[in-house]
Amino acid sequence: MMNQQYDKPKDAEEYIARQRKILANNPDCGTTRYNLAVGLLAVKKYDEAEKELLATLENSPGLAEAYVQLGGLCLRRGDMDGCLAYNKQAVKAKPGFSEGYGNIGFVHLQRGEVEEAIKNLERATAFNFRYIQAFATLGSAYLMNGMPDKSIENSLKALELAPDFPVAHNNLALAYLEKGEYAKAAEHCDRALELGYEVAPQILDEIDLHREK
């Protein structure tokens, strides 16, 4: 989910105070309310941030980023339906909004709706060819759909953008294992482990079995 990062909580508090001051002079400015919400999210004031995001959309109904942030808050409390609905509103407000499509694809994948996930994730990567998370999630989706070659293709694209992205290494380990390319599977499994990813025990056992041959 889109969010602004701060090095220290103090930076976020100063940012919030600045946005409140601007808002006091222009209470109908949707962009300022959105900026305030981003600051509140940074300090984990989720309820207050949600109120500001809803107020943002009252003043600026076309601000797609606000829908995405609201979707993120829904996801945080386990509301998949809410997350999906808000992200659909995001891409309706801003056609070609890659993050909205990426989040829609993620929700469909969590629900096991693989074909819908792939369709939306492909849109996300078409609109943003540097969308690392979407390429990695596509790798997972194609793997679930029994398409290891397409999984490898998208996982490798993720690694071109971020060589140390652990999910992509794990997906490659699974895909190469499925294709019987055990050396490559072991290589990516080892890298995923080095990067702190918890590879499934049964996968580790299967890879270790082939190492011994």
Image (spheres, rainbow, N blue to C red):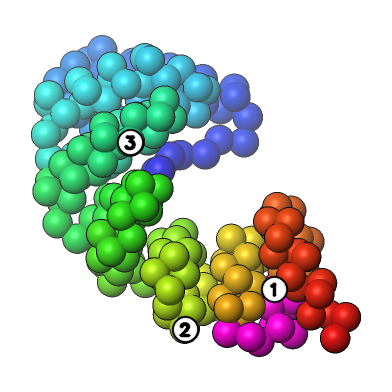
Residue 209, visible in the rendered structure: yes
Tell me which corner region of the image, top left, top right, bottom left or bottom right, holds residue 40. top left
- Disc with the residue nearer the chain's start (3 vs 2): 3
User: 64 left or right of 196?
Assistant: left
Q: Is residue 14 visible?
A: no
The local crowd at label 3, few if under 14, some if 14 to 19, many if 20 or more residues have their Cα within 10 Å, is some
Asked which secondary structure carries label 3, the reply is helix
Which residue in the protein does label 3 denote?
80
Q: Which residue is mark 1?
A: 188
Left or right: residue 103 versus residue 14 is left
Residue type at mark 3 is Met
Q: Which numbered tag is attached to residue 89?
A: none
Residue 160, image quadrant? bottom right
Packing grade of label 2 (10 A; few <14, some 14-19, many >=20) is some
Residue at left offset 58%, top offset 60%? 167
- Indicate yes or no whether the magenta region holds residue 168: no
Residue at x 12%, y 24% (from the top left corner) = 58
Q: Earlier in the sequence, mark 1 or mark 3?
A: 3
Residue 46 picture location, percent across and down: 42, 20
Element under label 1?
Answer: helix
Q: In the image, which residues are magenta? A: 179-188
- Residue pointed to by mark 2: 149
Residue drawn at 22 percent across, 23 percent down: 54
Q: What main secondary structure does the magenta stretch of the protein show?
A: helix
Look at the numbered disc 2 and give the secondary structure of its residue: helix
